[in-house]
Amino acid sequence: MFAVFVILPQFCLILLGYLLTRRPSFAKKDFWIVTEKLVFYVLFPPLIFLSVAKANLQIGQCSYFLLISISAMSVAVITAWLANFLIKESPWTKWSIFHCGFRFNTYIGFAICSTLFGDKGIAYLSLLIACWVPISNVIATVGLVHASRLSGSENNGKRKNFLVAVLSNPLILATLLGLVCNSFSIELPKLLVDVLKPLGQSSLALGLICIGAGLKINDLKRYLQLMIVGSLQRLMVVPTIALAFAIIFQLLPLESCVLLLFAALPTAQSCYVMTASMGGDSAAVADLTSAQVIFSLLTLPFWINVMLEFFPN
C-alpha cells in the first residue's frame, strides 16, 4: 500500500490531464503543445539544475554508477529488438515501436524520485538521463530511419538536425551546468535560487498533467498483442535487468533504487512525435505509449516494493 500511495498522486494528475482534454475549453491541441514546451524549456531545467548543483555527489562513484546503468540499459535495447520477433505486425510497425522499449517518461520519473529520494535522488537521475538521452536518441533514430525506408518515406532532414537537437536538449544542458557548479563548489546567489526553485517545483505537476492530455488510444483491438508484448518488455523485463546489474555489480542502495526506478518507467510521450515526423507507424506508437503509462500504474508499485525488499536502506 505504501508503494501505491507513492505513485497515486502522480497518476491522479495524469488522470486530471486526460479529463481536461474532454472539456471543450481544454480540447485544443495547440494549447497542450505550448504547455509542453513551457514545461520542457522553462520550468523543468531549473529543477534539474538546482538538484545537481546542490547535491553531495562523489564524481568517482557517479562514474561507476553511470557505467553500470548505461550497460544495463544497453541490454534493454537488445530485449526491445528481440521482442519484435514475438509481434505479428509488419516490419514497418515493428521498427516504429522499437525505441519504445528503452526510452523513458521523464516527468513520471522525477515526480516519483522526488517523493522517494529527494534532491540527491534527482541529481543521480539527472546524470543518468543526461548520459542516456543522446545514446537512446541515436539508437531510436537508426530504428526510425529503417522504418521510414520500409514505408518509402525516409526523412533525411530529420537526421541532419539530430546532433543539434541532442546538444541543445535543455535537460542535458541543465545537468551539465549543474555539474559544473557542483564540481567547482560555485555558490549560487540566493535570488537566483529563489527564482528557480518555484519554477522547478511547478514543472512536475504540470508535466504530469501534460502526459494525461497526450494519452491516445486509437485501435485497441488491432494493436492488442503489440501493446501486451511491448509493455511487458518495457515494464517488467527491463527493470529485471536493472535489478540484476545493481545486485551483481554492488551499487549503493540509493544508486540501485534510482537505476531500478529509471528502468521501470513507461516509455516517453515524445516517441509519438518523433515517430510521426520520421514516417513511422505513429498510431501504433501512440497506443503503445498510452498503454505503458496505464499499465505502469500496476507495475511501478511492484518495483517500489522490490526496492524496499532488496535495498531497505
Image (tube, rainbow, N blue to C red):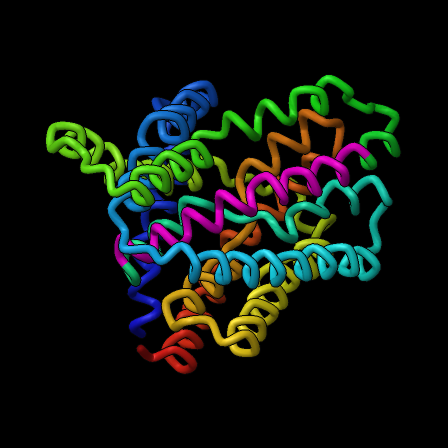
- Name the side, left or right, on which 88 lies relative to 67: right
Coordinates of residue 267 in the picture (x, y in percent): 56, 49
Residues drawn in magenta: 118-145
- Which residue is depicted at the point 55% across and 42% down? 133
Number of marks present in the image shown = 0
Q: Nearer the viewer, residue 219 or 77?
A: 77
Q: Is residue 131 magenta?
A: yes
Residue at far bottom of view: 309
Question: With respect to residue 239, does 195 lie above or below?
Answer: above
Quarter of the figure that contains the C terminus: bottom left
Coordinates of residue 130 in the picture (x, y in percent): 49, 43
Q: Residue 81, can we see it?
A: yes
Coordinates of residue 39 in the picture (x, y in percent): 36, 30
Residue at far front of view: 184
Question: With respect to residue 255, does 127 lie above or below?
Answer: above
Coordinates of residue 3 in the picture (x, y in percent): 34, 70
Quarter of the figure that contains the N terminus: bottom left
Examine the residues drawn in magenta and state their main secondary structure. Answer: helix
Q: Nearer the viewer, residue 89 or 53?
A: 53
- Name the side, left or right, on which 8 lies relative to 145: left
- Which residue is depicted at the point 49% across and 36% down? 214
- Name the side, left or right, on which 251 lies relative to 308: right
Quadrant hosting residue 99: top right
Q: Is residue 84 magenta?
A: no
Q: Nearer the viewer, residue 25 or 160?
A: 160
- Which residue is depicted at the point 55% across and 74% down? 249
Q: Residue 204, can we see it?
A: no
Question: With respect to residue 177, does 307 lie above or below?
Answer: below
Q: Nearer the viewer, residue 161 or 89?
A: 161
